[in-house]
Amino acid sequence: MKYQPEFAIDSEILTLVSDISILIGRIHGEDTVSRNLKLRRENRIRSIHSSLGIEGNTLSLEKVTNILDGKTVAGSAREVLEVKGAVAAYDLIDSLDPYSADDLLKAHGVMMNDLVQRPGKFRDCSVGVFKGPVAVHIAPKAEDVPGMMEDIFNWTRGTDHHPLIKGCVFHCRFEFIHPFVDGNGRMGRLWHSLILSHWNPIFAYLPVETWIRSNQQEYYAALNDSDKGDLTKFIRFMLNMIKMAVDEFVDLSTHDQGISNIERKILEIISRYPEATAVLMAKELKVSDRTVKRHLSALVEKDVIRRVGSNKTGRWEIV
């Protein structure tokens, strides 16, 4: 019997897929990436730093950057090796086939070289995810791993679902199977980006991992919830993280055009609700209060908006 994941495409998921697709449409694919080499490099560093940070790596963004530049940094030997392995694996992303088990094993071999005894090999022992002494997930038996991985590869390759959906499903199922002794989290996130990059190459350089790290407890909760069989919550969570990453990229890449993407959205909110606070705007836009305040200040400096009345009881006015 072929593997069929259990999930529901609800109105929120449909809206997220639509919103992300519209945002992607504003990006001129490879041309935009090539014209933003600095942004592309910064995003790749953020991806690696955040994905390893989720797994407990304590090296700072600056140190990860220095390692990428070939500089010697102070830190534990293992953490430095984790960064070097992740850099090497992410550098392969343009040459990997997202539907190839051999390529998955190859990437794991590069990612976990000198970090595990059998890099690039499916596990031959039992593994689990623990929170202190408590097991929060016990992975399937080692002998079932090759067959289960073949099933999810076949489903992902053959499904008619949107790439945004199938990337989330693969990510979630991968973490459930936990096919390796170590490195499952970082490999699952890398492979998710790889699947999406075959839909649009911009995803090879979008730091979705940064948003996952900022919402790490929700990430774990969604994964744990999927253990019951229904992947809907995880798909919804990941689509929100992807939307934030795309939103940010559009915002940064169009910032030099006068009014950035997020500033346009702030203006839309103000036009509907002049009394809106930065907190309310941040909640609607799914960004931080600090981000909204920074863009509000920028709009004031550009003489696009002004504050009428006090900070507490006043309102925003579009000039």
Image (tube, helix red, strand yellow):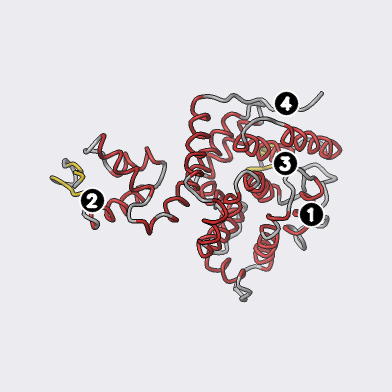
Q: What whole-number distance in Å separates the C-alpha atoms at marks 3 and 4?
A: 24 Å
Label 3 residue SS: strand
Q: Nearer the viewer, residue 301 or 35?
A: 35
Q: Amino acid at mark 2?
A: Val
Question: Eyeballing the image, is 57 above or below 23?
Answer: below
Mark 3 sits on what residue? 128
Q: What whole-number distance in Å separates the C-alpha atoms at marks 3 and 2?
A: 54 Å
Q: Nearer the viewer, mark 3 or mark 2?
A: 2
Report if the CB atoms under discs 4 and 2 are less than 8 Å apart.
no
Residue 271: name its quadrant. top left
Q: Nearer the viewer, residue 53 or 135?
A: 53
Q: What whole-number distance in Å separates the C-alpha atoms at marks 4 and 2?
A: 51 Å
Q: Is residue 241 left or right of residue 181?
A: left
Label 2 residue SS: loop
Mark 2 sits on what residue? 304
Of the image marks 1 and 3, the number of the one nearer the N terminus: 1
Question: Eyeballing the image, is 218 above or below 233?
Answer: below
Mark 1 sits on what residue? 106
Label 1 residue SS: helix
Q: What whole-number distance in Å separates the C-alpha atoms at marks 1 and 4?
A: 26 Å
Question: Eyeballing the image, is 82 above or below 161?
Answer: below
Of the image marks 3 and 2, the number of the one nearer the N terminus: 3
Q: Nearer the viewer, residue 56 or 297?
A: 297
Q: Which mark is residue 317?
A: none
Question: Eyeballing the image, is 85 above or below 11?
Answer: below
Residue at image location 53% in from the left, 42% down from the top: 217
Q: What whole-number distance in Å separates the C-alpha atoms at marks 1 and 3?
A: 23 Å
Q: Position of residue 293 (x, y in %)?
A: 30, 51
Q: Which mark is residue 4?
A: 4
Label 4 residue SS: loop
Report if the CB atoms under discs 1 and 3 are less than 8 Å apart.
no
